[in-house]
Every structure is written in C-alpha cells, then in structure tokens.
Amino acid sequence: MANKIYYLASCDTCRKIIKSLPNTDKLEFQDIRQNPITEQQLDGMYQLSGSYEAMFSRKAQLYKSMDLKSKNLTEADYKNYILEHYTFLSRPVFIIDGKIYIGNSQKNIAEVIKALS
C-alpha cells in the first residue's frame, strides 16, 4: 500500500494540516468527495486500525441530524455509514509505511510529521 492521505479538499483543517507537512511528494492524495473510498480501501484501513469505529467521525453533521447518538451502532454499521457518505470518515486519514493515523489531533499530526520527515 502506497503512503496515502484521505482528506477533503474543501476542509479548512485538512488544508491547514497538509500545508504543515514535510515531504508531501511522498504521499498519494485522495479527496474523498471527488474520489470516494472503496470498500477495499476501507477494509485495508480496518486491517491497520482494527476498528471501523476508530475511523468514524461523530462530528459529522449527518451524525447529529440522523440522531445516530441514540442508536447502538455496530462495527458493520460504522463501516456502512463511512461507505455511504464521506463525511462519516474521521479526517484526515494517513497511511504511512504500513501504519495508520486517523484524525486531526495535535498528537496525531505530530506523529505524521515525524513519520514523513
């Protein structure tokens, strides 16, 4: 699997993070709105993270509007929601040298910068 970032080009946070990264030429970029993630890609991320829930964004507006908080979601539900709509993927997701980094926490981004340096 190539070193890759799954992101949203329209997301200010994603753009800001990408600007801060060294050696972005080592990354393959995939805008998940223009080029939605496939089930195969998501399964690959699952192999690295061990959980669909770990990749699921509870910040998505659809999460609130669909009242998913009140539902008991399973791993299969998380997977289906992520495949159904790109906003359910916690962004950005980096895969670097066989390791996955999910989300935009400062700690996570610091690890990504270290991995790319």
Image (cartoon, helix red, strand yellow):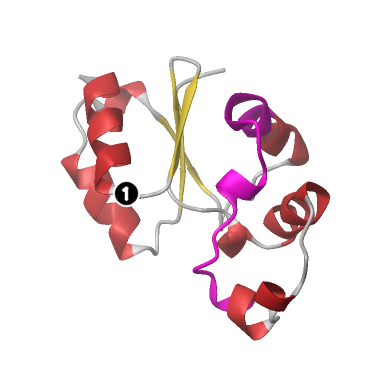
Q: Within 10 angstroms of label 1, few (less than 14), some, or many (20 or more) residues?
A: few
Q: In which quarter of the image is the N terminus?
A: top right
Q: To which quarter of the image does residue 34 belong?
A: bottom right
The residue at 32%/39% (across/down) is 108
Q: Where is residue 26 in the image (x, y as percent from the top left)?
A: 33, 21
10 left or right, relative to 106: right
Q: What is the three-letter code of the residue carrying label 1?
A: Ser
In this rendering, the count of numbered labels is 1
Q: Determine the secondary structure under disc 1.
A: loop
103 left or right, relative to 111: right
Q: Is residue 101 magenta?
A: no
Q: In which quarter of the image is the C terminus?
A: top left
Q: Is residue 55 magenta?
A: yes
The residue at 66%/33% (across/down) is 46
Q: To which quarter of the image does residue 3 belong?
A: top left
Q: Where is residue 56 in the image (x, y as percent from the top left)?
A: 59, 54
Relative to 42, say whether 80 is above or below.
below
28 left or right, relative to 73: left
Which of the pair 74/1 is nearer the observer?
Answer: 74
Relative to 56, say whether 5 is above or below.
above
Relative to 94, say whether 92 is above or below.
below
Which of the pair 36/69 is nearer the observer?
Answer: 69
Which of the pair 59/24 is nearer the observer?
Answer: 59
The residue at 22%/23% (across/down) is 114
The residue at 49%/68% (across/down) is 59
113 left or right, relative to 83: left
What span is in magenta? 44-62
Q: Position of residue 47 (x, y in %)?
A: 67, 25
Residue, disc 1: 105
Q: Position of residue 55 (x, y in %)?
A: 57, 47
